Image (cartoon, rainbow, N blue to C red):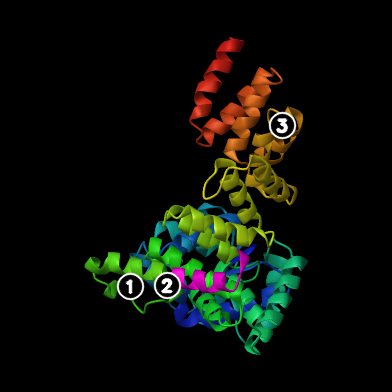
Amino acid sequence: MRYQIFISYRRDGGESLAALLHERFVRMGYRVFYDVESLRSGNFNEKLLEVISECDDVLVVLPPGGLDRCIADESDWVRREIVHALKCEKNVIPILMRNFSFPENLPDDLKPLVNKNGVSATMEYFDAVVDKLAKQRLTCKPDQEADRQERHIQHLEELAQQGDAAAANEMGIVCEYGSATRVPNLKKAMEYYTKAEKENLAARYNLGDIYERCSIDLTLIHEYGILPDMELMEEKNTVVLKESLKKKALEYYQSAADEKYAPALYKMGSIYEAGANDVERAFTYYRQSATQKYLPALNALGWMYRNGIGTSQDLEKAEDCYKEAAEAGYPAAIYNYAHMLETRDPEKAMNLYKQVAYGENALPCAVYALGRQYEFVLRDMRNAISCYEKAAKSGMEEARDDLERCRNTLA
């Protein structure tokens, strides 16, 4: 999600005004990233710089003494945000609160901020400040879709507060991944999912996903608020902690699967196929999930039928599973279905490969397979080379030999 406006502020003295600016511009339809300083930790800090790189305007709220900590501390996050915005040549707008003045000994990388066209702001004339910013200072324009999205989120919040479990789960998703008008708040996401999980299977599954990811990356524990302070955990307890988190994740997945929630059934299948090495049980879970037309499960079931894993090999059933998921648009199934059709119907196979070989989400294996179709079926070496080059750049090592062979053919 690309934000239009980034609000940077110092929590001491600037938080209230920053919050008001965020609320008002969101209501006006702008996509606003409100830099929640109190939630900063871990990788979230680095993501702030990525947001600044992509936005149009950066509002820097400056209360009295707001830049004092920036002078001697290069790692100060307000300083890092401002410096990054200046380097990226963003439209930086200082919001000068009452009694603020620029320090005389600003470091060189902050001095350009002094010459930026700022706006004096007071609570008494807040409406006039917003109007001036919108009409004279901002380079971006309101996004009406963002405005509609925010109204929908506010409606979900109201329903969640009234005890609607489905709405609480949806709010958990909004808080976890953010939206055009909301920054991610992982602790709040955890609260919403926990509130909803007794009545909502999706929330139960989402909690399992969180615990599983935390078992892989322990820094997420603090981000989601699972433990009060990760630093209190001794290094010798790391293995025990990871196993405990995995166990908790499995409990949530199993609980949702017991009530026939399709994604949880599929997840249990993948756990038994890989980690538990019980392919017969994995097949059972995949089949139960696939009966609900869950596309990843249909694709996995096709794989097991095709290779005789957890069941007897049945190529006809494998093709049926792939075809059903492919016709519903599942990329991996489109590739697998095309692979089964290569000999019998090469033209259809090629058309299927093309569906998943282009665009941002192209499958490297499909790009490689398309290259082989160009080379061996159509004898089109130039297009084959193009596909092999793309596949090789995506990490398909086997494409490198094919690429060299085709280049030698044209030499």
Is 206 placed above or below 375 here? below
Residue 398's x, y, as percent?
50, 28
Residue matched to label 1: 230
Q: Amino acid at mark 3?
A: Met
Q: Amino acid at mark 2?
A: Lys
Of callouts 2 and 1, the N-terminal one: 1
Residue matched to label 2: 248
Can residue 141 be seen here?
yes
Residue 168's x, y, as percent?
62, 80
Residue 81's x, y, as percent?
48, 62
Q: CA distance from mark 3 to mark 2?
A: 44 Å
Q: Work out whether residue 260 or residue 174 is closer to the camera in this orientation and state it.
A: 260
Of callouts 3 and 2, the N-terminal one: 2
Q: Work out whether residue 125 or residue 161 is closer to the camera in this orientation and state it.
A: 161
Residue matched to label 3: 350
Of callouts 3 and 1, the N-terminal one: 1
Q: CA distance from mark 2 to mark 1?
A: 17 Å
